[in-house]
Structures are given as C-alpha cells and as structure tokens.
Image (cartoon, rainbow, N blue to C red):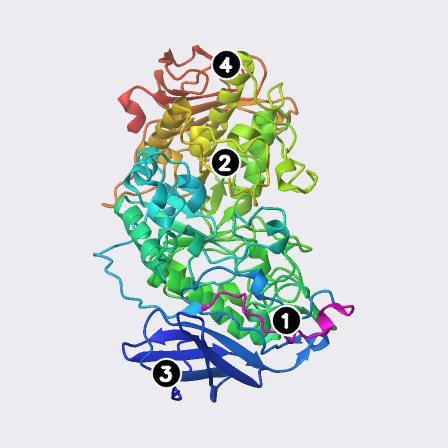
Amino acid sequence: MHILPGHPYPLGATWDGQGVNFAIYSENAHKIELCLFDEKGKETRLSLREQTAFVWHGYVEGLQPGQRYGYRVYGDYDPDRGLRFNPNIVLLDPYARALSGTEDFHAGVFGYKLGAENADYEMETKQQRGAPLGVVVDPHFDWEGDRPPNVPFHQSVIYETHVKGLTMTHPRVPEHLRGTYAGLANEHVVRHLKELGITAIELMPVHAHLDDPFLLDKGLTNYWGYSTLSYFAPEVRYSAAHKGKKPQIAGEIHEFKQMVKALHRAGIEVILDVVYNHTAEGNHLGPTLSFKGIDNPTYYRLVDDQARFYFDYTGTGNSLNVRHPQTLQLIMDSLRYWVTEMHVDGFRFDLASTLARGLHEVDQLSSFFTIIHQDPILSQVKLIAEPWDIGEGGYQVGNFPVKWAEWNGIYRDSMRAFWKGEGGLAADLGYRMTGSSDLYQNDGRKPYASINFITAHDGFTLRDLVSYNDKHNEENQEGNQDGHNDNRSWNCGVEGPTDDPEVNALRARQQRNMLATILLSQGTPMILGGDEIGRTQGGNNNAYCQDNEISWYDWENVDEALLNFTQRLIRIRREHPALHRRKFFSGRPIRGTDVRDIMWVRHDGEEMTDEDWKNPVTQSLGMFLAGNGVGDLDELGNPVRDDHLLLLLSSSHEDLEFTLPDFGGCDTWELLLDTSDDAAQEAVAAGMQANLVARSVKLFRCANIASRD
C-alpha cells in the first residue's frame, strides 16, 4: 500500500471521496506509523515521512469510510522528562470522529509493566491493543434545512439529563432504542420535553469515555462519563446502531444528528456538558490510550521540576495543558466541530476554572477565553461554566467574563438553606431571586448569566433533598465515604421513604417550593431531569457509577401532580416577561409614578426596612414586580408590558397572614400559584390578608387592567 505526502491540515483522518488524508501532531516523536486494520484485525503499517510544523501527515489512495486505524509513535521513554513514547501501543487519534468500539483492558492499555518494582519506569514490551481504533467517516448528512432554535438566554429553561437514564425504562420507547440517542429522539420522549415547556436539554457527557478499571473490578461502570477518551467521537455506548449482531460502523454519528434534528424541530436546543479539563488517561500510573503516548508534555500539565507527575486540579489524576497552542487548538477544533457538523447549540464546561489557569492562578484573560471570544462561531453559542475546580483559588463563581453564564453554586446553597428553615438569609435571598446582581452586574453581564439551580446530577435529586438528612452511597462500594457531606438537605422528620401522610405532604410542598423558587427567580432556571416526575436515587448523592435503576428514570411511577405543577410553573414563567427580564432591577421609581420596578414587602404589607433585611429570624418576604417596569423592548421597539406580580415566600414552620399591598394602583390580587394547594382559587383585595401556609409559596397577579398601563 502506497502513501503519498498528503497535507498537514486538517488534523485527523479526512476522506475526500478518493482516499484519506491523515495528520497527527507530535513535537517530541522520532517516528510515527499509521496502522490500518482490516475486518479481521490484520494490521498494515505505513510510516508518515512528511512533517510540517510538528504535524506528521500522509495520504492513502483508495481508502473508504469505515476504515479502522491507529498510530504507533516512537520516541524516548523517560518518565522523569515527561516522555512516555512506546511503539508497542496502538494509540487512538485525538481527532478521530468515530471509534471502533470501547476499550479492552485485557488486550493491554498500559505503557509500563504493571506490577514492576520500579512502577512506571519500566516500559512495557508486549503489544498493547486495548485502545479503541479510530474510524474514517463520511461527514455527509441530510439536515433537511435544520436551523438552531436560537432561544434568547433570558427566555431559556434548561433541563439537565443523561442520554441513557432518560429513556432506559420508558415504556413507550422500543426496547432496542432505550438508552440511546435514537431513544431520546423518540416522539414520546420529545413530546414529554415539549409539553414540560423546557427550551434546552443539557446532556451529560456524550464524548467517548473510559470505564475505569477500579469500577469494572467492582461490577460498576462510569455512568456519568466524566472521563473523556475522545473529544470528537460520540459515545458508542449510547448508540442503537452499535447494538445487535451487526453493529453499524460510525452509526452513532448519524444517530446523534437525527436526535439533534428531532429536538430542533420541537424548538428545543441541545447543550453539551463537556470535559476539556482532563482526560481518561489519569496520572503517571494511568493507562496510555492516546494523548499520553503521542506527546505527553504537549497535552498535559506536568510538574515543572518533576515531569514524571501531573498537575491535578480535577481530582482525576491529570489536567490538560491549555497553555500549549496545540492543546488549545484541539479544544477549539472540537468545539467548532460539534457546532458546525453536529449542530449543537452550546456547551456547559465541567470544572471550567481549570481551563482558565495561567500558571497556577485562575486568570480571566487566559488564552482560552480570548480565543473563544474572538471566534465568529463559538462566541455566538451558549457558553456555561461550572466555575470551580479543586485547586487553590478554584472557586470562581461570579468571576467569569462577559458572554459566559455560570452555574450559580451560591444560589443553590442559599435556596437550600432557606427552605431548610435557616434564618438570617433575607438579604441573600433578595440577591438570588433578582439575578444575583452582586455577582454579575458590575462586569457587564445580565441576570441570565446566573444559571439558577437547586439540584443537579452531582448531589441529591429534588425528591431525595427533602427525604434524607444524610447521603446513602453504600452501593458505590466506597464505605459511604464518597459524595458531599454538606447537602443542606432536610428529611422533613423521617429518613427515607415513609407512609406518614403529613411527612409526605410536607415533602411534596417542599419540592414545589424549590421548583417555584427556581422558575420564578430572575436568571436562567435549570432543573434536574426527573425532578418533575419525582425521581429518587434512594439517597445516593454521587451516583456516578450506577448504571442501573438507581440512576434511570422510573417512568412507571410518575408523580403526575408534580409533573402538572412543573408544567404550569414553566408556562407561567413564559407568559410573564416580568419573570425573565433581560436587565437588572434599578430600584428607582418608574417615570410618572411612585412605584419602583421592584419592591419588597413584610407580611404586614409594609415595605421591608434595613432592619428587616438584617433580622436573623426573618423567614418570609414578598416581592412585588411592576408590570410597567420590565425595561425591555419587543421586536417592534415598543416597551414590554406585563401584569404587576406579587410573589410571597415563607420558610416559617407557622402559617402567616400576609397583608397584600396596594402598590401600582392594584385593587385586587388574583392567585396564580399556591404550592400548598393546586386547586386553590383566590382573589384578595389590596390591604386585605391572604393566608400563607407554613413553608409555601404564593404568586399573585394584579387583576385590574390598569396594572399594564
């Protein structure tokens, strides 16, 4: 088989209809061989003799999509210098668009001799073929005019979920499609999401990942997928095309695109949870599958004076070397690929503080942000940061630059504490309910930069948050030592499931209280998938390794009342622009009136004072939103108008008589929502009292038309 010089760009394997161009980057390699495999696994090696700016490249005529390939990379094996080349390993191309399958530890994935006295210093001399191979793909796909929904951020409602867990037990999804991209695209699943009212689905990692050996030894797997093996290839475990007797090579790409197309048709955006902070190769004792054997010092941050070891800001053994131009290019090429070729609408960056580190400190002006902000494609999609890592100074909530939204961990902690019944949180509650201006206003961002959430994949589900005081992670086989201990949860008097009707009624109300808080706050709400149907993990707050009924949605036991309530909440939010403003409140009087765009009320109907905000026993408040103070313009340039709204919240254990104010000339307040009574219908004259049940939320609208004037 003859190899031609080819081209150094683009990186990866590119089919042009007549053959395939191969290009791979390595600064420190002495030699690289392209390894082609036929259907029986027979290997053909071709040396890449051309090198341009550290890119090794070659072109092979006649190769077609479906061709399996890998690389053998030659160079020094010297861990103390950070060099881990071993040509006995067939390595995965970092730019592979599809994988031949999953890893096989029995076939060998380590560059050093396991069990040797000097650990990783002794290079493995046996053939290591356990890494999956790359697959040449045909990128052509009929998108049938697919267009991104382009939902404005301030109108977004995000639903965080898992491809497999969402559909694995769904009775109306064909069994062979459950747990797959095709299953998520099923009409019944899409209908549930559409009727729920969410505007974006945020998928936990779909990049190809590794199942860690220590989990496999326990009979567990890496269910969450935060152990990336390839930044371009979709995970084959979620592909129906890889099931059955005759797996369809690279079928997961077509299947993923069909899923995106189906969601877009329903007006739902697709956001990917991406892990560019570390890879599956772990620390110096981890496997060698791709990056580590291709050019370890390029792709990983090594300890300066001890290059055998890796900086670890993630708790997984390594951190990507974002300071290196080639690693930055890898990340940007990957992001652009998922937007341009796979049509996704945005990204949530796991442990994003790691990407912003210069030498050690987190730097807002790092190259990572600079490149994204000037990129004409990436700067226009939704960018969401998980603004922390485990390194020193890694907690960076509120410190990311413009164009970025953030998971607001302060919002989560404050709301959990408030509904648990802790006092002295009035001032903090005021900030969180209004978009966290203390975190996002002074740097040019808007309220929607705050991704408001109370539950997420990492931690208790909403039902468990109100059912357990303590984590119950025994099934993870780590002695219940894993997972967070500070959950700010409250079991309402009984640990775990109970038949006590009073406890169950309180738990139901608490779940509604928290959903109402998220969806009636300024900012961008995110709900954890399954919370709307009462999903439980049995008190497990770290179900990362539970690919079973602990994590899968229980579609046979849907809490219909909670589902209906959540649908109504989202509809109310959508119908009232005062609940999803694009601008922060000014607190100043609206022109020609003595009414401000936001006003805060005590339960006696009077405005809150400085003393009330500081009072450690304050557990209730009212938030008045002026319908004529939204401050936005519609598409025709006219001021956006809404009803005056009045939101009452109480985490007190006692019922309160709340006097409704007469702000804005409102004569009568009409009840829109009551977390203590779905069927409640109420109209209260201004100046009169409404009963606010212990630990509950009520939302009123001004019933007289004058409120829109």
Residue topped by disc 1: 111
Q: Main secondary structure of the magenta part?
A: loop
* Amino acid carrying mark 2 in the image: Glu
The reply to whether residue 143 is visible in this rendering is: yes
Residue 18 percent coordinates (x, y): 28, 80
Residue topped by disc 3: 60
Mark 4 and mark 2 in contact? Answer it, CB < 8 Å.
no
Is 274 situated left or right of 465 in this image? left
* Mark with earlier residue (3, 2): 3
The residue carrying pointer 4 sits among few (fewer than 14), some (14 to 19) or many (20 or more) residues within 10 Å by Cα, namely many
Mark 3 and mark 2 in contact? Answer it, CB < 8 Å.
no
Residue 117 percent coordinates (x, y): 78, 68
Q: Quadrant of residue 125?
A: bottom right
At 51% across and 31% down in the image, what residue appears?
536
Q: Is residue 238 above or below residue 161?
A: below
Magenta segment: does it hold 130?
yes
* Mark with earlier residue (4, 2): 2
Residue topped by disc 4: 693
The residue carrying pointer 2 sits among few (fewer than 14), some (14 to 19) or many (20 or more) residues within 10 Å by Cα, namely some
* Mark with earlier residue (1, 2): 1
Mark 4 and mark 3 in contact? Answer it, CB < 8 Å.
no
Residue topped by disc 2: 549
Q: Is residue 596 above or below residue 653?
A: below
* Amino acid carrying mark 4 in the image: Val
The reply to whether residue 655 is visible in this rendering is: no
Residue 108 percent coordinates (x, y): 59, 66
* Amino acid carrying mark 3 in the image: Val
> Which type of secondary structure does the marked residue at label 1 adopt?
loop
Q: Which residues are magenta?
A: 116-133
Say which quadrant the C terminus sits in. top left
> Which type of secondary structure does the marked residue at label 3 adopt?
strand
